[in-house]
Image: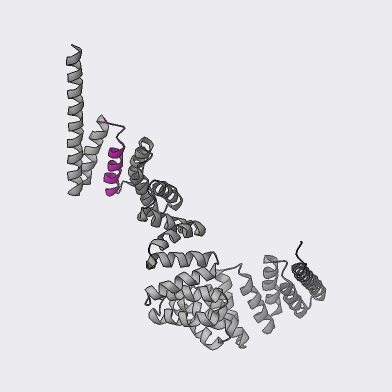
Amino acid sequence: MLAVIAIEAQTEVRNGVEEARRHYELAQSYERAGDWAAAEKVWRQVLAVSPDDAHAWANLGVALNKQNKTADALDAWRRATQIDPALSGAYLNIGLAYFRIKGYAEAATNLRHALALEPENVQARELLALSLIAVEDFQGAIDQLEVLYSQNHRDPPILLALGQSYLRLKIYDKAIARLQELTRVSPDSAQAHLLLGEALDNASESERAIPELRKAVKIDPRLPEGHYALGYALLKTGELDEAAQHFAEELRINPGMALALFHLGKINLNRGRVDEAVSMLEKVIEATPDFRPALEALGQALLKKRDSARAVEVLERAVKLDPSWPDGHFLLGRAYLAAGKREYARREFSIAQRLSNDERKRLEEKASGSKQPAKP
């Protein structure tokens, strides 16, 4: 009797395995045909019989995702990882799904799991790096990108992402090195020359930056912020006429770029075109009300126009934004003096003097401290 029961049990197991195999084959045939709704139905049949089948949950997630049922797909993949925490493909799919819907923090968490289980998975590492860039964890992104770079020194997207990440962290030497490699690999990439130019300019190498920025706007004359970057580098080297031309061109392409308008306004102020400067700087402040340098420049322009009442109003706003700014108090004092408010002017001049003295003392103390002999 016991032998009969054992034989019957073995037969049931074989029948169950065979039934599961048939369901798997049927679902996979639907998947190959692109009939994801039918595949979903079969995977649900499998799970009705075997609710702890992690692979079936993972496959159900794929079928749901293909039908744009993202939330249900994520639930299925999470269930798969709960049953089998070593299922790297499910973590990868979760990470990819979150990446597509811009849930970058969640994407990064799951992609780290996938990568821990499968360190050679290039797709997981690339997606993790991009997710970290999206959440502004640039050092974390660099850690992943440098691994990819060590495997392929000539991959343009990796070089681009590395250059951008080092640039954001102000590690200019490494940004320059990677972006120079990128320009060699992709010499016709306007973006590569733009970023290399920006890195060189930020590293106080404006003269080396200018040829790269010229290449960028030559390759793509409508490159976003290309003319602005070139204008800013030219401004630093004293080439004001050409800088003004590029700021104007940037504004023609991108009329809302406040920084280009600000620098063009300052150039006009320096050239004595006060009315033009005032008009431009007012537009900058309208777009960015708390941009202190624009308030300062507008205050100076209004003083030149002898519009002391408006100069006072503008410079009071500027000083309120940064009360520790000596030059701001001095300019405000000039505005008060021009407006006939001598007592207010004396107060501002006194504050400016005190702040300047404090700043000079700090610099002297810092210099004195740096000259102290090292302790034995």
Looking at the image, which residue is at 79% across and 70% down?
A: 361
Magenta segment boundaries in residue numbering: 50-66
Residue at the outermost front position: 376
On-image quarter of the N terminus: top left
For the residue pair 9 and 363, the one nearer the viewer reads as 9
For the residue pair 245 and 163, the one nearer the viewer reads as 163
For the residue pair 50 and 3, the one nearer the viewer reads as 3
Can residue 354 be spotted in the picture? yes
Residue 55 against residue 145 in the figure, above or below: above
* Residue 299 falls left or right of residue 288: right
* Residue 167 falls left or right of residue 323: left
Q: Is residue 282 magenta?
A: no
Can residue 249 be spotted in the picture? no
Pinpoint residue 325: horizontal percent, then vertical percent: 71, 70
* Residue 43 lies in quadrant: top left
Pinpoint residue 282: horizontal percent, then vertical percent: 58, 75
Pinpoint residue 194: horizontal percent, then vertical percent: 45, 75
Overall secondary structure of the magenta stretch? helix
Looking at the image, which residue is at 66% across and 75% down?
A: 296
What colour scheme has been applied to the protein in the rendered image?
A: one colour
Looking at the image, which residue is at 38% across and 39% down?
A: 85
Q: Is residue 61 magenta?
A: yes
Pinpoint residue 305: horizontal percent, then vertical percent: 67, 84
On-image quarter of the C terminus: bottom right
* Residue 243 falls left or right of residue 120: right
User: In the rendered picture of this protein, how many numbered marks are placed on residues?
Assistant: 0
* Residue 320 falls left or right of residue 25: right
